[in-house]
Amino acid sequence: MYKPNIPKPFKKIWRLFKPLLKETLFPFSGLFYSFLCWALMKTVRMKVKGAENQKKVEAAGKKYIYGFWDGRQMMLFPFAVGKNLVILATRSDAGEVLKVIHRFFTLKVIRGSSSSGGAAALKGMIRALRGGMNGALAVDGPRGPVGIAKPGIIQMAKMSGAVILPLAAGIKKKIFINSYWNKVQIPLPFTSGQYVIGRAIEIPRDADRQEMNKLLALFQMELEKITGECDEF
């Protein structure tokens, strides 16, 4: 990947002002996005399909992990409110903004990703799940490829005992930001759409690598299926 040759004086200026930006600009950006997302989604009529799949998990006294595609988070943030969720946020500068957004929508944040601090983040998520929280994970993040689920959610479910719930969101009228790897979807005001909760997937504590790979493929198929249902709505 090409990296521009930034003159040293500019690098020094950035290092000097970066702490200030983290304390001011990043939180402001997170709050601005959160209010924009909340106000926009208030105009969108959303239905929920597959709620019985989640109710069965809850009736069995089990915790769950929502697994979803990264580019649809703007639609999913309001859905998360009040569900006692813990989520991962990258340790990058973007994670500073995401941390504010997640907290605005009542999600507990653990910093880390597959590319930075992954082991510590996984342990933090497992502790939170064992402690009584539910989880949420963008399964193709933090860098893609888009629409390809990574195995982290399988490992997380196995070690915590939580059940995986595939989760998708789709809307009729939207725009795409294709300049980002995750092809972000932004709903247009006063449209309609739906959330779909897929069939629960349980990961046995004694599952070996081959079985975990099969369950990852099953999760991929289920998430693709319900995503298609959302997009056809």
Image (tube, rainbow, N blue to C red):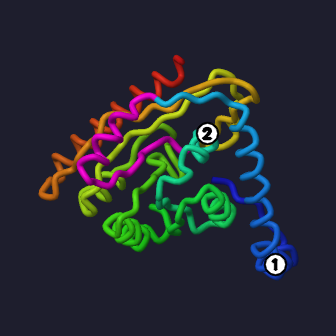
Residue ID at (46%, 23%) = 228
Who is closer to the viewer here, 76 or 94?
76
Q: Where is residue 153 in the image (x, y as percent from the top left)?
A: 35, 53
Residue under circle 1?
20
Q: Position of residue 30 (x, y in %)?
A: 73, 59
Residue ID at (53%, 49%) = 80
Q: Are marks 2 and 1 in contact (CB under 8 Å)?
A: no
Q: Position of residue 136 (x, y in %)?
A: 45, 53
Who is closer to the viewer here, 145 or 109?
109
For the record, the magenta segment spans 49-71
**Distance of mark 2 from mark 1, alpha carbons?**
31 Å
Crowdedness near tag 2: few (<14), some (14–19) or many (≥20) residues, C-alpha within 10 Å: many
- Is residue 142 one of those drawn in magenta? no
Please identify the quarter of the rendering in which residue 125 is found. Answer: bottom left
**The C terminus lies in quadrant:** top right
- 200 over 162 or under it: above or below: above
Name the residue type under label 2: Met
Residue under circle 2?
75
Asked whether, in this view, residue 68 is left or right of residue 18, the answer is: left
